[in-house]
Image: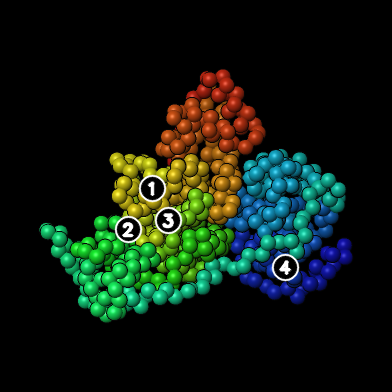
Amino acid sequence: MSRWTRNLLLLTRQARILSQVRLTHVAPIGYLQCSNPVLLDNFGRREVFVCRRGHATWVTAEDMDYKGQILVYSILGCPHCMKSKNTLQKLNLPYTDINLEMFPQCREPLKERTGKRTVPQIFFNATHVGGNDDLQNLVKDKSRLQQLIEDVKFNAPPPEAPVPPDPSTAVVDAGSGNFVCEPDEYVQLVQELRKSGLIGDHWQGIRVHHNSFVGRDFVNWVVKNKQLERSDAIMMGQALIDKHFGHNIKSDLSFQDNDVYYRLLDDEETHALNAGHMSDCEPQAAIELGEDLRKIILKLYSAFLSPDGKKVDYKGIGASVEFKHYVRLTKELQRVQIASSSREEKLAFFINIYNALVIHANIVRGPPDNLWQRYKFFHTVKYIIGGYAYSLQDIENGVLRSNRKGVGMIRRPFSSSDPRLKVALDRCEPLIHFALVCGARSCPPIKTYSPDKVDEQLRVAAEAFLESPDGCEVVMNNKTIYLTQILKWYQEDFGKDKAEMVSWVRDHVPEGEKRNHMSELIDGKKYKVTFMSYDWSVNS
């Protein structure tokens, strides 16, 4: 027995017991406080998370004498990573989890070593097994698997094996959604406006504008009560619009000193999930609020996704403290400053919000279970964002697809006069289809995205999904390429015809046998495309 093992066993006797804790809920390297071993009773299985060379490592009592190492390069919340680690746990194999978000310096060396951008990447000592699919194939090859296990058990890592990074170089997260409110000075003005008697039902011809006020009346009220010039009163009215406290009923973005009607945001008749009393905080930039929300979402995904990353524990999320924190923070979306954000900021922001909105709606409204309910779900489930309501369809087709018609839509989401059109991307981004998760089993796995890495993260998400049998399969015997229905529904985003779409897919499948087979079929120009059936059952 090694000295490390003896020390571990001694320390383990003093380790605190955590009952009924699933290992998939334990944070990977960098998030786990590993100064002492933690003994977990995982539904009857005695398991230990320890620090080994400063890294969080999973072991079982019978596997403490391994001389070598199994390394799993992953990112937090990655479904394929979770599935591979779950497989290693079921095999009772100790592994060290290296989170590339916390050790970004490992990304390029890993790519050079493996030729892959996707995660996970798994090593048994110096042997590169590959990703999750490769690991599952290895499990079926019992003879080769046993050879690799014996290599790790009896041999120390050779010089050519990857070396875990120094834990002191980890990029430490500052927190998870630690939102600090800066009070908005215009809150007081809104409160006084509510008491002024200006807000009510106003008739314009045969049409009534409920809970509205008139621009000229507002200016007169400010001039009288604040002792200001009309020009200053108009500027105050404009500030209410710019800060998203209210807006012109007809969507004009300017405040006017005439018979134009305005309405405060929390007087809008909407069923948006974050509707109600407006936030009293100064509006945040999208990049700041988006990061606060992303951190909370990441914690929820990490804790309540199944080991394979394809199922969501909606009941668990709904009862969690983190979800209550998330719901409170969605109020800040009402007045977030999004229009001036960069393309990358909008991409990451709206993808994360879309996926979180689906989960939020499934928790509070329940998932749709037929065609009509799905149509209603995607058109009526909404958040108020930057002063305006956005449905799931608005986010996907209006913003991220640059105002293109979606499936079954007869017109574009945003008209030429719609103020939300200014938020839409300048061009459609096809990679979003491998990041948006509609809540069905056939959707891509759930992840979160950050503005500074969003393009790379989207490429990796596309590669991972198309590498899996859910996204693309190639059968050479009958020269058939099987593709996800997503590519059929949004074919125009991937090329002007089916041939261009197939070439796009080939170019985004990772290097390997599947890509080579696709190239062979495309070059021979004799192949057929079949779209796989789509499983709309809820991913819970």
Identify which residue, 444 or 43, lies in the foreground.
Answer: 444
User: In the rendered image, which residue does mark 4 sit on?
Assistant: 34
User: In the rendered image, which residue does mark 3 sit on?
Assistant: 339
Q: Are marks 3 and 2 in contact (CB under 8 Å)?
A: no
Q: Position of residue 149 (x, y in %)?
A: 78, 48
User: In the rendered image, which residue does mark 1 sit on?
Assistant: 398
Q: Nearer the viewer, mark 1 or mark 2?
A: 2
Other residues around mark 1 within 10 Å, as few (<14) / some (14–19) / many (≥20): many
User: In the rendered image, which residue does mark 2 sit on?
Assistant: 253
Q: Which is more N-terminal, label 2 or label 3?
A: 2
477 vs 349, left or right, is right
Other residues around mark 3 within 10 Å, as few (<14) / some (14–19) / many (≥20): some
Give the amino acid type for the residue marked by disc 3 in the picture.
Answer: Ala
Task: Give the spatial CA distance, label 1 vs label 2.
Answer: 19 Å
Q: Which is more N-terminal, label 2 or label 1?
A: 2
Give the amino acid type for the residue marked by disc 1 in the picture.
Answer: Gly
Q: Are marks 1 and 4 in contact (CB under 8 Å)?
A: no
Residue at coordinates 68% horizontally, 73% vertically from top-left?
17
**214, above or below 116, in the image:** below
Q: Are marks 1 and 2 in contact (CB under 8 Å)?
A: no
Give the amino acid type for the residue marked by disc 4 in the picture.
Answer: Cys
Task: Give the spatial CA distance, label 4 vs label 2.
Answer: 54 Å
Other residues around mark 2 within 10 Å, as few (<14) / some (14–19) / many (≥20): few
Task: Give the spatial CA distance, label 1 vs label 4.
Answer: 46 Å
Residue at coordinates 32% horizontally, 58% vertically from top-left?
253
Q: Nearer the viewer, mark 3 or mark 2?
A: 2
